[in-house]
Image (cartoon, rainbow, N blue to C red):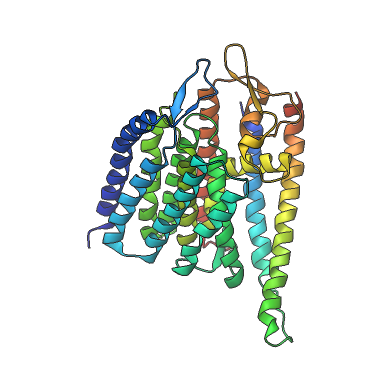
């Protein structure tokens, strides 16, 4: 078998190149079919093709299948199947407006292959203190993790480039953490997520040429969750994702139920005359991460995105510190 | 610095996650229920699940209070 670093380079190049070259083709195909949506954060009427999920999935599938040829591990198979199912859940939501509960329930079903393939270790590893064996509870945890990570990434997909840029930071941090805890095979399996996100960011950054849509965001989020489970780094993965977790937490604690963003009655962000983003004063609007960032005054879309990336880098650093604390008992 | 309270909030969340892990490992995990025959395993898991869920609820409650403390004035302005 080839050395792991060489396999890593091969699958990283495959993941990046696939998305880099298929996304422009997808943009053309979507525009031709008039599958476009308005970019509400631009002063002019700009229509952006959506969804970018197919090119994201293509990059993940080609690279992960290549990795499977080399390693033939059940963990990689579980990542491939769960991620693909999450893509179809997102695609269904992209094509047709579905209820707020559809995505969490369907994503819970997408997590089932991980259980059926037995690609998990039924205990939770905590930093400093060791692990807890929870055989029955862990099955329930798997069912919860995929909907949570999927919807968490979907919920930060509110500004140009944020979901793909944030995912790039979080997934590379997760890869480093997996290397730190010596889980090299799953570290390899996590590489395509970072490179797919990075390649997609090229087209998603301000001004976006394509939006990932639910199919893109759920694919990225579900793959992240799958890696967390099969790599046995659930707590570390949650820490790297904290800014997005805060966004979901703030949103849910202010609206107090599971709803789609399109069901919100008042927008948390409004525009200034020069089309900067500004936090609304409407008390009916939900509290979100972007609204909190804008509480100190208006910013451009790009500036808000960079603050979210800084938060992502901070959480990534905490996740890496946490990975060094694994297996260390006080 | 813009977003400083959010960095502080993330730090608090991180510390609470680590403390929560300690509570799970040292207090909840060692709990063992015996004397109910075949039901021992189910009861044991059930009790641990209820305590764990209570911890999560407590975590959400604490985070919610801290959120209000850090952000309420900012958002209302």
> In screen coordinates, is A196 left or right of A100?
left
Quarter of the figure with residue B32: bottom right
Left or right: residue A25 versus residue A34 is left
Q: In the picture, which quadrant includes the N terminus of chain A?
A: bottom left
The reply to whether residue A206 is in sight is no
| Residue A44 visible, this orientation | yes
Nearer-the-camera pick, A158 or A91: A91
Residue at left 63%, top 59%? B21
Residue A327, how many percent across, how many down? 51, 63
Percent coordinates x, y for residue A132 in the rendering: 60, 68
Q: In this picture, is A248 found above or below B35?
A: above
Residue closest to the eye, A39 or A119: A39
Toward the viewer: A202 or A43? Answer: A43
Q: Residue at x 52, y 44 (%)?
A: A93
Could you say where residue B67 lies in the image, as x and y percent from the top left?
A: 72, 39
Task: Give residue A140's position: percent from left, percent from top.
Answer: 60, 64
């Amino acid at each position: 078998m080839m050395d792991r670093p060489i396999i890593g380079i091969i699958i990283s190049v495959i993941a990046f190149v696939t998305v880099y070259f298929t996304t422009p083709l997808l943009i053309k195909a979507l525009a031709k079919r008039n599958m476009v949506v308005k970019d509400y954060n631009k002063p002019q009427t700009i229509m952006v093709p959506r969804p970018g999920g197919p090119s994201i999935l293509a990059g993940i599938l080609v690279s992960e299948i290549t990795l499977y040829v080399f390693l033939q591990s059940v963990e990689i198979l579980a990542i491939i199947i769960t991620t693909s199912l999450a893509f179809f859940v997102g695609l269904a939501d992209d094509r047709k407006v579905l209820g707020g509960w559809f995505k969490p329930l369907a994503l819970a079903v997408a997590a089932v292959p991980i259980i059926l393939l037995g690609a998990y270790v039924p205990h939770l590893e905590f930093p400093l203190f060791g692990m807890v064996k929870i055989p029955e509870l862990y099955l329930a945890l798997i069912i919860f993790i995929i909907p949570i990570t999927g919807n968490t990434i979907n919920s930060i997909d509110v500004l140009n480039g944020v979901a793909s840029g944030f995912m790039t930071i979080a997934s590379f941090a997760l890869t480093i953490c997996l290397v730190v805890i010596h889980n090299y095979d799953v570290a390899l399996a996590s590489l395509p997520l970072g490179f797919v996100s990075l390649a997609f960011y090229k087209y998603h950054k301000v001004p976006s040429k394509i939006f990932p849509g639910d199919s893109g965001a759920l694919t990225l989020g579900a793959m992240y969750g799958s890696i967390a489970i099969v790599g046995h780094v659930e707590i570390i993965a949650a820490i790297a994702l904290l800014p997005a977790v805060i966004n979901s937490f703030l949103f849910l604690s202010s609206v107090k139920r599971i709803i789609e963003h399109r069901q919100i009655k008042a927008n948390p962000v409004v525009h200034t005359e020069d089309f900067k983003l500004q936090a609304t004063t409407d008390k009916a609007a939900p509290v979100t991460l972007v609204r909190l960032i804008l509480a100190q005054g208006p910013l451009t879309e790009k500036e808000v995105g960079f603050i979210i990336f800084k938060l992502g880098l901070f959480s990534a650093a905490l996740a890496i510190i946490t990975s060094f604390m694994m297996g260390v008992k006080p | 610095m813009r977003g400083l309270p959010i960095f502080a909030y993330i730090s608090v969340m991180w510390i609470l996650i680590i403390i929560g892990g300690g509570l799970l490992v040292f207090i909840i995990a060692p709990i063992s229920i015996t004397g109910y025959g075949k039901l021992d395993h189910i009861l044991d898991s059930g009790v641990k699940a209820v305590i764990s869920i209570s911890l999560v609820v407590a975590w959400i409650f604490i985070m919610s209070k801290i959120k209000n403390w850090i952000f309420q004035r900012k958002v209302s302005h």
